[in-house]
Image (cartoon, helix red, strand yellow):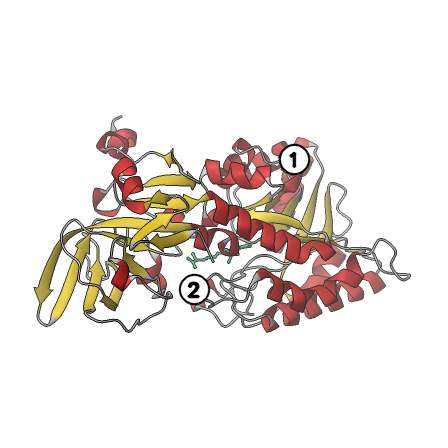
């Protein structure tokens, strides 16, 4: 699952004790394992290799430049959703032709930047957006490639905030509108509209929603072919799961085994008359990054309120928003519980002697500021370090400075080497933009 293991009762990230990282970087801090990033990227790449996909890491889930550079060095492209993410991808050395750009609200300035950078694919989400893209391309006198994000009306059975492919969603255009879309814009002289983009939600813990949406997309591609429109790119988006609990998610090979039989025949260079070979794009984020990171936090105080025990930590919803925003489960455990209390697996409840029902909360002035509610944990005290697992995706990227707490540090561990890849913000950083 990952390279965060207990040795003699002490949590290590690869070869380094977690406490050593905390000593060097302070807390709260995000700690990433290079080996885990590599392992998860490789597993996806190998599993889907028969479809020769372009893997575009979804920058929104973990956008640190050092992480992006690592993935670029492994051959990854990037899925971006803003000018800022595009800048990060380019700064990390990503070849622009391997950058795909989605998002329902691309501004004129962002479109211009992406056109000037020469990105590989615009994933267009509405008629108005296509017209705007075509207008700006004409003004600049540049050509580009685009895919239409299609809403396949499939239920990915995930949190409603991250369900994106149902009919009523703000993303993409309905399947029924797709043919008219291609009929209207398919001959644009500068924006070559030859792709279909899907992203049904995140995380998707079963393979059926992918099958359903790919079947619908391929049927659409065949209908378009009959009308003389040759689709050459199918971007399946992201959404593959991660293990917030042990063995919770299908592994990369299971997703691939389910989806590949539909894709492999369509990517072969020689196709039956009327069919165009497809280039497949995938946009995984969480499946690569989530298990590759933890959040380290220190317990400031322990207190009782009524019959509840609170461990008040220096990380809260400002450091990791997922528990309070989505009710998301993150496994939490002390980094030095002692050999007798090493967790055997990551689960909602572990049965061990002496565990205490604990509310793991942050320092913010909100009751919704929690990391874990009603959790059985070894008894903790002031100064203890806790690890919040599976925090590598949508952790740091969703962190805020609420209550004027500076953003956490980020650390990359490679074997026995600790590198600070984002320094902790200082109070000077916090007010820097206001000192006008
Ligand atoms: N492609 C598109 C177009 C997306 O919108 C997303 C995620 C991805 C790819 C990557 O999905 P992944 O492989 O990481 O599941 N903040 C939420 C997740 C929001 C996902 C938004 N889109 C969370 O913390 O769970």
Rate crowding at label 2 as few (under 14), some (14 to 19) or many (20 or more) other CA atoms within 10 Å: few
Q: Can you give x and y, in whole percent of width and height, for residue 243 in the image?
A: 45, 62
Q: Does label 2 or label 1 sit earlier along the sequence?
A: 1
Quarter the C terminus occupies:
top left
Rate crowding at label 1 as few (under 14), some (14 to 19) or many (20 or more) other CA atoms within 10 Å: some
Q: Residue at 50% of width from left, 72% of height from top?
A: 157
Residue 281, compared with residue 157, is above or below; it is: above
Find numbered disc 1 in the image and state the secondary structure of the residue it sits on: loop
Rendering quarter of residue 434:
top left
- Residue at which label 1 appears: 118
Find numbered disc 2 in the image and state the secondary structure of the residue it sits on: helix
Mark 2 Cβ inside 8 Å of ligand 1:
yes
| 175 or 221: nearer the viewer | 221
Which numbered circle lies on residue 161?
2
Q: Residue at 21% of width from left, 46% of height from top?
A: 403
- Report, in whole angstroms, how far the alpha carbon at label 2 lies from the one at label 1: 32 Å
Rendering quarter of residue 20:
top left
| 145 or 359: nearer the viewer | 359
Q: Is residue 7 visible?
A: yes
């Amino acid at each position: 699952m990952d390279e965060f293991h207990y040795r003699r009762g002490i949590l290590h990230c690869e070869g380094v004790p977690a406490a050593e990282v905390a000593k060097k970087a302070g807390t709260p801090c995000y700690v990433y394992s290079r080996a885990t990033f590599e392992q998860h990227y490789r597993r996806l790449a190998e599993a889907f290799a028969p479809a020769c996909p372009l893997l575009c890491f979804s920058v929104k889930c973990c956008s640190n430049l050092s992480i992006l550079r690592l993935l670029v060095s492994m051959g990854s492209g990037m899925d971006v959703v803003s000018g800022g993410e595009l800048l990060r991808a380019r700064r990390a050395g990503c070849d622009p032709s391997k950058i795909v750009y989605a998002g329902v609200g691309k501004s004129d300035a962002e479109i211009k930047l992406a056109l000037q950078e020469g990105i590989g694919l615009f994933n267009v989400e509405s008629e108005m957006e296509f017209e705007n893209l075509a207008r700006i391309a004409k003004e600049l006198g540049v050509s580009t490639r685009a895919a239409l994000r299609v809403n396949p009306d499939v239920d990915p059975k995930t949190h409603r905030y991250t369900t994106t492919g149902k009919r009523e969603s703000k993303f993409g255009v309905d399947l029924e509108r797709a043919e008219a879309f291609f009929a209207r814009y398919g001959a644009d002289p500068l924006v070559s509209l030859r792709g279909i983009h899907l992203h049904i939600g995140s995380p998707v813990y079963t393979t059926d929603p992918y099958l359903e949406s790919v079947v619908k997309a391929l049927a659409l591609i065949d209908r378009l072919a009959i009308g003389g429109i040759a689709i050459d790119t199918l971007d399946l988006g992201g959404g593959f799961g991660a293990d917030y609990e042990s063995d919770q998610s299908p592994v990369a090979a299971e997703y691939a085994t389910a989806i590949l039989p539909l894709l492999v025949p369509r990517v072969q260079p020689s196709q039956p008359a009327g069919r165009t070979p497809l280039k497949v794009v995938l946009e995984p984020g969480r499946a690569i990054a989530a298990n590759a990171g933890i959040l380290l936090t220190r317990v400031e105080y322990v207190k009782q309120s009524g019959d509840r025990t609170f461990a008040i930590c220096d990380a809260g919803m400002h450091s990791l928003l997922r528990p309070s925003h989505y009710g998301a489960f993150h496994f939490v455990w002390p980094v030095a519980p002692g050999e007798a209390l090493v967790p055997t697996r990551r689960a909602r409840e572990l049965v061990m002697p002496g565990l205490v029902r604990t509310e793991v909360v942050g320092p913010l002035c909100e009751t919704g500021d929690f990391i874990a509610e009603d959790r059985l944990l070894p008894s903790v005290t002031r100064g203890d370090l806790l690890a919040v697992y599976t925090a590598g995706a949508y952790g740091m990227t969703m962190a805020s400075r609420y209550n004027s707490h500076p953003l956490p540090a980020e650390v990359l561990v490679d074997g026995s080497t600790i590198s600070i890849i984002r320094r902790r913000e200082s109070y000077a950083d916090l007010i820097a933009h206001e000192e006008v």
